[in-house]
Image (cartoon, rainbow, N blue to C red):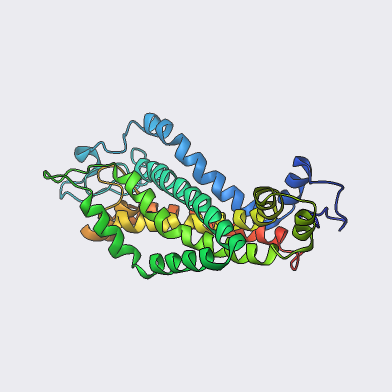
Amino acid sequence: MSEVFPDRAGTAPAGRPTRDALLRTLSGEPAVRFGGALIALVVLTAVLAPLVAVLVGHGPTAQFRAEGLDEAGIPIGPSTTFWLGADGEGRDVLVRTLYGAQASLFVGIPATTLSMIVGTAVGLVAGFAGGTIDRIVGQIVNVVLSFPFVVTALSLLVLNRDASGRPVVSPVIVVVLIISAFSWTYFARLVRGMTLTLRSSPFVDAAVTAGATRGYIVFKEILPNVFPVIAVYWAVQLPVNIIAEATLSFLGVGVAAPTPSWGNMIADAQRTSLYQVQPWFLLGPAIALLVTVLGCNAFADGLRNILDPKRR
């Protein structure tokens, strides 16, 4: 088997690539550096959100109508007190945008990781077993993909309410499960196709001849060859799931207000039309969402450039 990460001189190092060699290869790819810098910026803003809130003295849900709204009740623009201005309730747009990064990452990363784990397991089983199991899994995937995401998510989130209208389970957990319930199918299809190809490879035949068990073949021979592609696809699927969370929050069924989320912040700006006089009310969360998606896509593209032997 060829090495996944060759050195820049074009020759593969002996054995598996070391951590230093892997880091040098990643740092040598411009798209990885650019995307990694944007992702690091988003993560840093999420981590430092409480510190910024303390520095400016504005909590993410605190309302400052006297300071944040003018005499006509219109939110003020950027100032020394509100760096990105205020929203229609007199809340700090900058602080809420930074906290919105926490909501997006807390939903996007667990949902994508759970989807990867479930989809990889299902794809490995279907691709390696083949036959009836493969056909059954294929039909299940087709059934799941036939459901419209938004309509199904709205229905499930509405059912997650008791008689008084309060959520039975935390909406964040429900959103993670709903997004995972749809996106695992893409991982399963990808892994299943690769497993079907790899199970007839010479190194798998050699392992079978040597008396290796099915578990050994799947986890020691096939999975290491599938994992680099899964890693790339994880980075591709992450911004998709973050947008899915923003969509549900935009519709009012994701992260519940007044907890800030980029989706519900954009929805507030559009619903009130106050962004016409205070554009940062809309631009703050919109630019943050754009930077996150751009960073993830660039990072995934850089990983693909490194891992795809046709692009090396």
Looking at the picture, how far across and down is residue 17, in whole percent? 79, 46
Please state which of residues 249 and 271 is positioned toward the viewer in this rendering.
249
Question: On the picture, is 42 further left or further right than 79?
Answer: right
As drawn, the residue found furthest toward the left would be 164
* Residue 2 x, y percent position in the rendering: 81, 57
User: Which residue appears at 18% of the width and 43% of the height?
Assistant: 166
> Relative to residue 296, is residue 50 depicted above or below?
above
Res 274 seen here: no
Residue 188: image location, x then y, percent:
52, 60
| Viewer-proximal residue among 221 and 76 | 221
Position of 45 relative to 243 (above/below): above
In the depicted structure, whether residue 56 falls above or below residue 254: above
Q: Quadrant of residue 270?
A: bottom left
Residue 122: percent from the left, percent from the top?
52, 56
Q: Is residue 84 visible?
A: yes
- In what quadrant of the picture does the C terminus appear? bottom right
Residue sitting at x 74%, y 58%? 204
Q: Quadrant of the N terminus?
A: bottom right
Q: From the viewer's perspective, is 104 left or right of 219? A: left
Residue closer to the observer: 123 or 299 = 123
Horizontal arrangement in the rendering, residue 60 relative to residue 297 (left or right): left
Residue at image point 21% right, 54% down:
158
